[in-house]
Image (tube, rainbow, N blue to C red):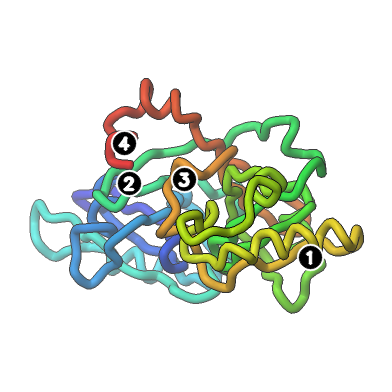
Amino acid sequence: MSEFQKRLYLILYPNEALVASQLSPEEFGKHYSIGSSRHFTGKVIFAEVDSSFRNEYLRIDEYLEYTESGQPGVPKRTKFVKSYRVLEHIDFAALRQLYLVTTDGASLGLDRSEEPPSYGTRDRVRVYQEICPLRLLVASNLSPHEFGKYITAEAWSKGAPKIFFTQYDIDVEAVVSRNEVQAFNMGPLPNVNPTNLPTALKELQADPDKKTKTVSLNPNLDVMSYKAIQPGFWFADAALIVFYRMPTMDELHYQHYSWWRHL
């Protein structure tokens, strides 16, 4: 019997991968973000996967056997199971907590939760950040449920069988109507041409049949603060959507201060 528990982690950002490890989620987040020069340094988002989950494509049993450090008292930190087309082969029922890791290696675990009622309505243009396996920054007049279904079932050229995405807490109409772009005001989206958001809004308003408009081809997550994310994160396929609620700033400050202070 192994000295340490073997776990499965689905990395969603900055890359897509299924990794076996003998580290706890908090240890894994710290190791992957700042603990190894061979790994990424920066934000990391991952989910723990039920260790009993199996899929023939992923060959999990084979790689779990290799998840031993070979040194007494030392856990195996990472053993990559697969780094390609991983999310589409994960059953949503096998997902456990979702973890947000700061650039300093601090982890915040989020549980599945009920979605706020208002987010099921198509009431305004929203800005979605596709995280895995797609990376586009997209403006859309679709609700999160509609967007998830559209990307996974209806958008052939820019879609995927399953997707993980979030929403930035941006009032697009207010941003566009407030002021024209000025040199000292580059808009609410770092690393994005400030004219892109107004252009996307105008196209969506002018054509009621248009569902989405790409704002940027590059992922914006690493230059955006976790503070900009509300109400949370979604996993979606053509038939199902799973939601993880992002705590409010007050909740983070008073209930998760050790993580909040790293923002």
Residue type of the residue flagged with mark 2: Pro
Along the polypeptide, which appears first: circle 2 or circle 3? 2
Residue drawn at the location 54% of the way across and 59% of the way down: 182
In the figure, 78 relative to 25: above or below? below
Real-space CA distance between mark 3 and mark 1, rounded to the nearest whole angstrom:
24 Å
In front of the other: 190 or 48: 190
In front of the other: 247 or 170: 170
Real-space CA distance between mark 3 and mark 4, rounded to the nearest whole angstrom:
14 Å
Is disc 1 surrounded by few (<14), some (14 to 19) or many (20+) residues within 10 Å? some
Label ID, residue 259 = 4
Element type where label 1 sits in the image: helix
Along the polypeptide, which appears first: circle 1 or circle 4? 1
Real-space CA distance between mark 1 and mark 4, rounded to the nearest whole angstrom:
36 Å
Element type where label 3 sits in the image: strand
Question: Which of the 4 quarters of the picture holds residue 236?
Answer: bottom right
Q: Nearer the viewer, mark 3 or mark 4?
A: 4
In front of the other: 145 or 257: 257
Residue type of the residue flagged with mark 1: Ala
Quadrant location of the C terminus in the rendered image: top left
Residue type of the residue flagged with mark 4: Trp
Element type where label 2 sits in the image: helix
Real-space CA distance between mark 1 and mark 2, rounded to the nearest whole angstrom:
32 Å
Q: Which residue is mark 1?
A: 153
Q: x%, y% of residue 190?
A: 47, 59
Element type where label 4 sits in the image: helix
Q: x%, y% of residue 145?
A: 75, 48
Question: Which of the 4 quarters of the picture holds residue 150?
Answer: bottom right
Q: Which residue is mark 2?
A: 25
